[in-house]
């Protein structure tokens, strides 16, 4: 019955319509009030942020203005590391009810504390995201984000309960069991990383569960790693669903900072009544105009335990204002096109993995599973894009590719028959050179060579400094 939400053309109701469709001027007044409150709380709490405000000549929030944000100091991940683990609290330590974090590359996690109020806010933000995807009371949500320190699993979990949906807390991994639960419980919505959506899509197809044979899934909410428009198109085909992006980072609150609506599926609505967003030039720190990619920078207007002023996320995306056909008036952000941390430097040129993904996945003969190998064996840094060819496992949707047009297997390897593997390699190399301006080698490896993601995020970049290749079937 509730799946009817997805079967008609009506616009699904918002979780907090007053806030999500608030007129712009009214929201600006609310944001200004909250920004002033945030500055006062930071000054009262003392510590790093208060000191920085003092150095900038700010003695109170009273005269802060939205059009004058640039004179306020920024914060960064380094501040959280410096204050590890409880150094930046704005509430007494015993008001912290939970700690989450991200693994971080240096071994030491980035930890973020939440008050009871922060958890309630986070649940509402994730409920907004689920409602924007068409979910409502009773909608079954198969939640395959990892549960634990990582914010994905518990964030969506709390949001689903807040919305009154029915959440299945599967967490990541044990894919065979996930296939059984999807077949038996018939969820409408799948939530996980995009790379795990691919793994699950392949497993469902192997088990013979497709839209043609009764797969119940209608929409997916995928996040926690950058993914391209090309990846969206391919996941939609693989699962026969509408794949939506969700954005968040534990420093700000976790998933639910921004999310796409199923009506437009075109850019993520930022919950800017709680997370004031700017896009800054990553080098100069100056604001960039709307439509220009910049470093997303957030001020957590209402968070209690660990409020952050102008937190520079390292994530690159463009902001876009204007009303959406879903009725939301919230500013939109583009998909994240890159993370400062993920940038590769190849022969002096900066390359984001997403730029390579865009080229690879635009080619239907290339499977969704790929890995980038940095070959450092000769002291040089050569980039090799390792991909597999499409097989019958990797394409099965009726919704996007009707059966009469040969959905799935018939689509495999479009245009590249056995023996023309060299043509495919040459074509991809050419397109990568055109798109990136540098030489990227391409290796077509046997099906199953690229490691699949069972839990959490995909490892899309591997180093090859000596010995055996990091991907079986890759020859050097
Ligand atoms: Zn919308």
Image: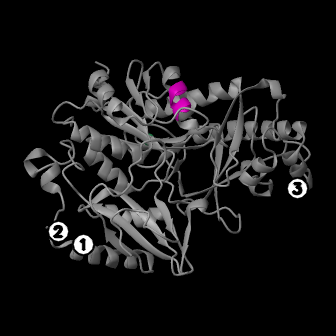
- Left or right: 236 as drawn, with respect to 279: left
Q: How is the image coloured?
A: one colour
Q: Compare residues 325 and 125 and report the one nearer the observer.
A: 125
Q: Nearer the viewer, mark 3 or mark 2?
A: 2
Magenta span includes 156: yes
| Secondary structure found at label 3 | loop
- Where is the C terminus found, in terms of image quarters? bottom left
- Left or right: 205 as drawn, with respect to 89: left
The residue located at (40%, 41%) in the rendering is 325
For the record, the magenta segment spans 153-159
Q: Quadrant of residue 256?
A: top right
Establish if 141 lies above or below 69.
Answer: above
Residue labelled with disc 3: 56
Number of numbered tags placed on the structure image:
3
Residue labelled with disc 2: 416
- Left or right: 93 as drawn, with respect to 275: right
């Amino acid at each position: 019955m509730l799946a009817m939400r997805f079967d008609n053309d009506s616009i699904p109701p918002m979780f907090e319509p007053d806030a999500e469709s608030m007129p712009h001027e009214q929201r600006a007044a609310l944001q200004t009030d909250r920004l002033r409150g945030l500055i006062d709380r930071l000054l009262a709490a003392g510590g790093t942020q208060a000191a920085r405000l003092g150095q900038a000549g700010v003695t109170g929030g009273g005269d802060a203005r939205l059009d004058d944000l640039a004179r306020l100091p920024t914060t960064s991940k380094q501040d959280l590391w410096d204050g590890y683990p409880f150094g930046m609290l704005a509430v007494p330590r015993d008001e912290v009810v939970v700690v989450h974090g991200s693994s971080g590359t240096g071994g030491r996690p980035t930890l973020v504390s939440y008050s009871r109020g922060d958890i309630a806010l986070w649940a509402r933000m994730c409920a907004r995201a689920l409602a924007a995807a068409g979910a409502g009371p009773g909608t079954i949500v198969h939640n395959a984000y990892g549960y634990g320190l990582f914010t994905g699993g518990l964030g969506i979990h709390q949001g689903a309960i807040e919305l009154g949906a029915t959440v299945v807390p599967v967490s990541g991994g044990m894919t065979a069991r996930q296939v059984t639960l999807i077949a038996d419980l018939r969820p409408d919505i799948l939530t996980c990383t995009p790379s795990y959506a691919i793994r699950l899509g392949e497993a469902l197809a192997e088990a013979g569960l497709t839209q043609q044979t009764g797969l119940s899934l209608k929409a997916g909410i995928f996040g926690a790693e950058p993914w391209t428009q090309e990846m969206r198109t391919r996941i939609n085909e693989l699962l026969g669903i509408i794949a939506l992006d969700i954005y968040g980072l534990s420093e700000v609150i976790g998933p639910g900072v921004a999310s796409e609506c199923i009506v437009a599926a075109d850019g993520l609505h930022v919950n800017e009544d709680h997370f004031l967003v700017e896009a800054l030039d990553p080098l100069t720190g100056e604001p960039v105009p709307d439509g220009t990619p910049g470093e997303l920078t957030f001020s957590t207007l209402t968070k209690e335990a660990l409020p952050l002023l102008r937190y520079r996320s390292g994530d690159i995306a463009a902001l876009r204002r204007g009303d959406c056909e879903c009725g939301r008036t919230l500013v939109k952000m583009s998909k994240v096109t890159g993370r400062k941390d993920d940038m590769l430097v190849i022969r002096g040129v900066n390359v984001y993995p997403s730029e390579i993904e865009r080229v690879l996945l635009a080619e239907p003969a290339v499977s969704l599973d790929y890995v980038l190998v940095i070959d450092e064996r000769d002291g040089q840094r050569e980039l090799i894009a390792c991909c597999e060819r499409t097989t019958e496992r990797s394409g099965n949707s009726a919704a996007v590719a009707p059966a009469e047009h040969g959905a799935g297997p018939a689509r495999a390897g479009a245009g590249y028959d056995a023996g023309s593997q060299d043509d495919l390699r040459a074509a991809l190399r050419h397109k990568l050179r055109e798109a990136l301006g540098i030489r990227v080698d391409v290796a077509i490896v046997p099906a199953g060579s690229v490691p699949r993601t069972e839990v959490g995020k995909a490892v899309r970049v591997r180093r090859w400094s000596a010995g055996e290749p990091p991907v079986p079937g890759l020859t050097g």
